Image: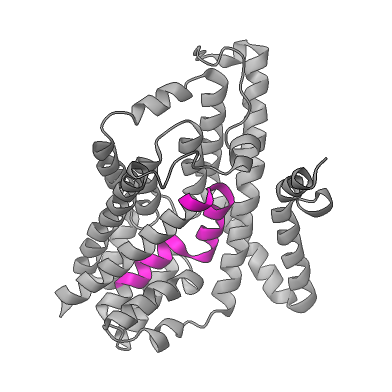
Amino acid sequence: MSIQEALTEIRKRGVLGIDAAVATLAGIIVALFAIAPAQATASLSFMFKASWGILPFFILSIVAIAYAKASGTENLIARAFAGRASTMVVFASLTGALSPFCSCGVIPVIAALLATGVPLAPVMAFWLASPLMDPSMFMLTTGVLGLNFAVAKTVSTIGIGLLGGFGVLTLQGIGLLTGPALREAARNGGCAGSKIRNPGAIAWRFWNEAERREAFWRNAAQNAFFLGKWLVLAFLLESLMAAYVPADLVMRVAGDGSLLSILAATLIGIPSYLNGNAALPLVAALMDKGMAAGPAMAFLLGGGVTSIPAALAVWAIAQRKVFATYLGAAMLGSLAAGVLYQWIAD
């Protein structure tokens, strides 16, 4: 084995054959029990509750991609997103604003879509819009921050989705975003699975063929492990941020409505954003203390997509250039929405 092959194998399997995500998860838990036992218990409780909350969507995503691979219906799924790219980006942005996924919970769905051949542009639009708004979030936002804020956030959500989708089309058009969107580990070891014989044929009742049954369970197991380990680690990190990141950090750095404060709120959303439900009362309290409308909007939008747990999950499955596009579109869109909303509020 060459040095390059050895390094590739280490990147895939971690040190001494130990999976990197699992080792990190175990190391954090052990360290917590040694240093802060009470926080360790609280973090584990949060991690299990959060994982349980997205479990139905996680299972459906895993089953869907495994069924698509085993039966051959992945070709039909890809064709459903075929057609005019601009139309699909608009459709995906609108659909994302209505879907009930959080920034981490949407990852298995995105991995399934990309693995079954759906183009990156509409997937990116859905990816960005989905964590930011859904019907229940709209009602909560209306109750906590008012109808005007909820409507503005909904429009901004769709706008960020459109920015990401059409941004991908633009980058692809000039040759800067070509090739597969998923990382090799996600395509071969986690999200794409292995091919079965005669992949062009569709067998709706795949369980009648032993080889297809084997492909289904193999893909389901690979997907569940690959995506599950990163989601669990992301939820553990989220619990630690909720416990140790000061709640008034945003107010101290991004209190007024200047461009600099809106930019600061967008950036601070990455380490300090908790989740959609927890962020609403936090932002309401900060606005009561004098935080301007623009930074509040930028914080909710930027943090909802680019928080560390969400970014970690995206980093695990996406190629680096796709991750950079995702992060850039989220931050640029959030900044623009914050500036525009501040201008309207003034």
Q: How is the image coloured?
A: one colour
Note whether 264 is above or below 27 in the view shown: below
Number of on-image labels: 0
* Residue at left offset 63%, top offset 11%: 209
Q: Quadrant of the C terminus?
A: bottom left
Note whether 38 is above or below 258 in the view shown: above
Q: Tell me residue 49's x, y (percent).
A: 58, 57
Q: Quadrant of residue 258?
A: bottom left
* Residue at left offset 62%, top offset 47%: 228
Q: Tell me residue 58's x, y (percent).
A: 54, 43
Q: Is residue 86 visible?
A: yes
Q: Quadrant of the N terminus?
A: top right
- Which residues lie in the magenta part? 297-322
Q: Tell me residue 100's x, y (percent).
A: 39, 49
Nearer-the-camera pick, 49 or 123: 123
Q: Tell me residue 189's x, y (percent).
A: 66, 37
Instruction: Based on the picture, tell me whether residue 78 belongs to the magenta stretch.
Output: no
Q: Quadrant of residue 149?
A: bottom left
Q: Is residue 276 visible?
A: no
* Residue at left offset 25%, top offset 39%: 86
* Residue at left offset 62%, top offset 17%: 212
Nearer-the-camera pick, 183 or 179: 179
Instruction: Based on the picture, tell me whether residue 315 belongs to the magenta stretch.
Output: yes
137 horizontally vs 218: left or right: left
Classified by dominant secondary structure, the portion drawn in magenta counts as helix
Q: Quadrant of residue 145?
A: bottom left
